[in-house]
Image (cartoon, helix red, strand yellow):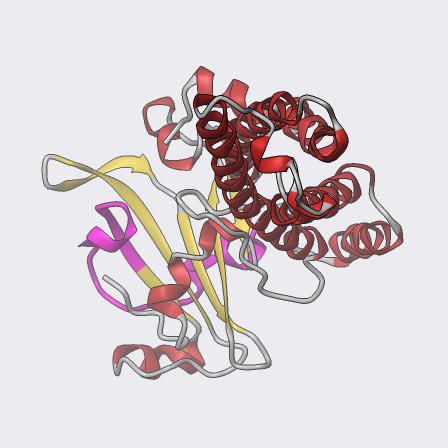
Amino acid sequence: MTASPFLEFIAREHPAFVHVPLGLVATLPLAMLASFRSRSPERWTRTAFFMALVGLASSAVAIFSGLMWGRQIALIPGGGFFPVVASGKQVLQRILQLHEMAALGGFLLGCLCVFLLWRAWHKDNQAALGGSPHRRHEGRRLWERGVGAPALAVGLMWLGAWGFCGKLGGIMVFGNEETNKAAAEAVEAKRLDAEAEVPVRALDYASLEPAEAVPFLSKAHGNRWGRIWVTASAIDAYKAGKPLESGAYAVMSTYEDHGGKPSEDVGPLYFLEIAADRKPKLAFYWPRVPEAQRAEVGGKDFVYWRSPDPHLASCLVCHAQGIAQSK
């Protein structure tokens, strides 16, 4: 579905949102250290607690905005939470996975840090009610004072997780040697790929063998009417419901439903090919998406998705075994 303008804004501003928690988490250890030798340790403990609390809340916003942004730029499948890495050449998807895990790890450490700081602040309040705010600090070793060594250690680990997360985010935005090499290889592969812009063979589906005489209504393909066309060498395997051999492919041409009958409105083409390694490769081609149906494809008016595009991840659930038949 098309995201609301508010969610689009949240996604677009992800690079800005991340600086708020990162700045707070980076300065948090300074406030925590100040609580160990200060004459007013309870003030620095309270300051550290509120810094951590705001940092945790803002990190939740940053994580959510990053998820929305990943979906918006198709690095994360719609409705998914992590990118799908189908090949070693998907460098950005692999870095994004580490980026997300570091962010989530930092968030969990942040929750623990907030809890430890709240407990330390709560003890300060109890000491103040007992008439001596400094009572719990007297006679204690340095690392037992203030917020306590465990809270400081967790705060430093939180900073490490978010620092690593930020480094990966910078790589995705500005690139490094690995991402630049992958981008150059992708450009070269696209230049040599005859079907980089349109699925040439799929468009010539009428030259293939029709698998049925009349269109059928397919709920699995958007409740559209379709006919399936298969390469001659694979038509028997298709009709028998068996996996297709390497090199075989099938195309499903579709028409939109109108009152229980096929209409004149042409729908998308679905393309399945069996690669040399016997794994299925999929494509979805919709050159002119009607305005009323653009919500199905994220608001786009032209769609051409090919494996390993994350938009096709759900399609592999039905076609993972190389069987084209899915009505």
Quadrant of res 244? bottom left
Residue at (64, 66) in percent of width and height: 87
**Residue at 60% across / 28% down in the picture?**
134
User: Is 299 above or below relative to 115?
Assistant: above
Residue 270: percent from left, percent from top: 41, 54
Front-most of residues 193 and 184: 184
Residue range (magenta): 199-227
Instruction: Please state, as top left, top right, bottom left or bottom right, where the N terminus lies in the image.
Output: top left
Q: Is residue 15 left or right of residue 261?
A: right
Name the residue furthest left: 260
Q: Which quadrant would residue 242 be assigned to in this image?
A: bottom left
Q: Give how far across and how far down residue 287 sits, in percent.
A: 49, 37
> Residue placed farthest to the right in the image?
177
Q: Is residue 241 visible?
A: yes
The question of residue 202 being in magenta is answered with yes
Lateral position of residue 197 relative to residue 293, left or right: right
Quadrant (top left, top right, bottom left, bottom right) of the C terminus: bottom left
In the image: residue 215, left or right of residue 50: left
Number of callouts in the render?
0
User: In the rendered structure, does residue 276 fall within the stretch colored magenta?
Assistant: no
Q: Is residue 266 above or below residue 241?
A: above
Q: Looking at the image, which residue is at 69% across and 56% down?
A: 194
Q: Is residue 251 visible?
A: no
Question: Which residue is nearer to you in this view: 300 or 161?
Answer: 161
